[in-house]
Image (cartoon, grey):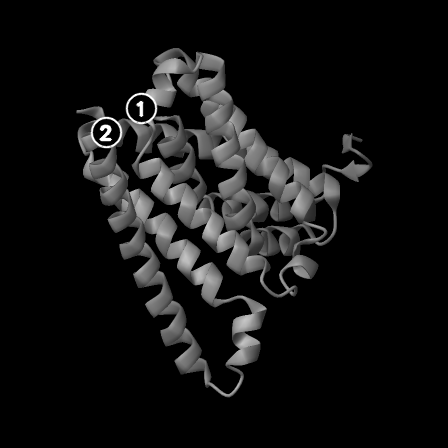
């Protein structure tokens, strides 16, 4: 009988859980595809596919690694605040790439810089997403690895499509960065320390706070990108 790491592949439950993990990961990987596309868009054409594949592998590896510890991590105060601020920095950085550094850096340096950006962003964005994937795996590491591994082509395909659209619709760059800012704001506002300090608030009030923080961070990302681009334009004169 065919087995995978001791798992009976003939069992319908295995395939049901595997499909569930794949579907969940695809649904929750839209933001990851955006980060991958934005981070790799400035790479030389020959390196873009490599950057997307490596970045996706890193993202999937992060989710596997976080599966066992994410529930504990999310209970610590300030973790989400620090992560959200890091994601904000990434969003602004993607809007205002340092052209001078890109010209002087080697191709390999640019590739690994893109991978670092993808990895850091995925650390923040996977904190919530990985819970759903881990729950579907029901503690089965082999099933988790299998399901996430099969999801890799879908994430790469999504990033490829987004990157192609960026060439025809440059405004999508700003929309993507604003979305990352929105996610960062939502992460910051959902930190345990915020909920503890505002425990007297009802659910509607907390939800409004998260919405307001997300909107402010999205707008701040766009504004920050505009300021940095304007400053770079003046320095290049």
Q: Is mark 1 on a helix, strand or loop?
A: helix
| Residue 46 drawn above or below residue 79 | above
| Outermost residue to the right | 6
| Residue 113 drawn above or below residue 121 | above
Determine the residue positioned at 63% across, 36% down.
Answer: 61
Residue 143, quarter of the rendered image: top right
Reading the image, the residue beneath label 1 is 99
> Seen in the image, is 227 located left or right of residue 107?
left
Determine the residue positioned at 39% across, 26% down.
Answer: 40
Is there any visible trace of residue 4 in the rendered image? Answer: yes
Is there any visible trace of residue 30 in the rendered image? Answer: no
* Residue 191 marker: none
- Which x, y percent locates residue 104? 39, 14
Q: Is mark 2 on a helix, strand or loop?
A: helix
> Seen in the image, is 76 located left or right of residue 233?
right
Q: Distance between the residues labelled 1 and 2?
A: 11 Å
Please tell me which residue lies in front, 170 or 110: 110
- Which x, y percent locates residue 24? 52, 49
- Which x, y percent locates residue 184? 43, 55
Residue 186, quarter of the rendered image: bottom left
> If the image is split into quadrants, where does the N terminus sit?
top right
> If the image is split into quadrants, where does the C terminus sit?
top left
Please tell me which residue lies in front, 145 or 2: 145
* Mark whose residue sits in front, 1 or 2: 2
- Which x, y percent locates residue 148? 59, 38
* Residue 235 marker: 2
């Amino acid at each position: 009988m065919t087995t995978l790491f001791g798992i009976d592949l003939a069992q319908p439950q295995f395939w049901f859980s595997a499909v569930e993990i794949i579907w969940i990961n695809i649904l929750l990987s839209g933001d990851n595809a955006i980060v991958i596309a934005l981070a790799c868009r400035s790479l030389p054409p020959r390196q873009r596919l490599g950057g997307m594949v490596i970045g996706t592998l890193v993202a999937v590896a992060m989710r596997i690694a976080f599966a066992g510890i994410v529930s504990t991590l999310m209970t610590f105060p300030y973790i989400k605040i620090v992560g959200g601020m890091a994601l904000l920095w990434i969003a602004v950085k993607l809007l205002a790439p340092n052209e001078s550094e890109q010209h002087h850096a080697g191709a390999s340096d640019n590739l690994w810089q893109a991978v670092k950006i993808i990895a850091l962003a995925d650390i923040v964005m996977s904190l919530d997403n990985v819970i759903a994937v881990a729950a579907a795996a029901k503690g089965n590491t082999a099933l988790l690895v299998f399901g996430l591994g099969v999801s890799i082509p879908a994430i790469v395909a999504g990033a490829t499509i987004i990157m192609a659209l960026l060439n025809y619709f440059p405004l999508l760059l700003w929309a993507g960065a604003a979305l990352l800012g929105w996610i960062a704001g939502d992460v910051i506002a959902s930190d345990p320390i915020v909920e503890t300090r505002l425990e007297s608030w009802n659910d509607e009030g907390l939800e409004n706070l998260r919405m307001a923080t997300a909107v402010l961070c999205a707008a701040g990302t766009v504004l920050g990108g505009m300021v940095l681009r304007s400053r770079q334009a003046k320095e290049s004169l």
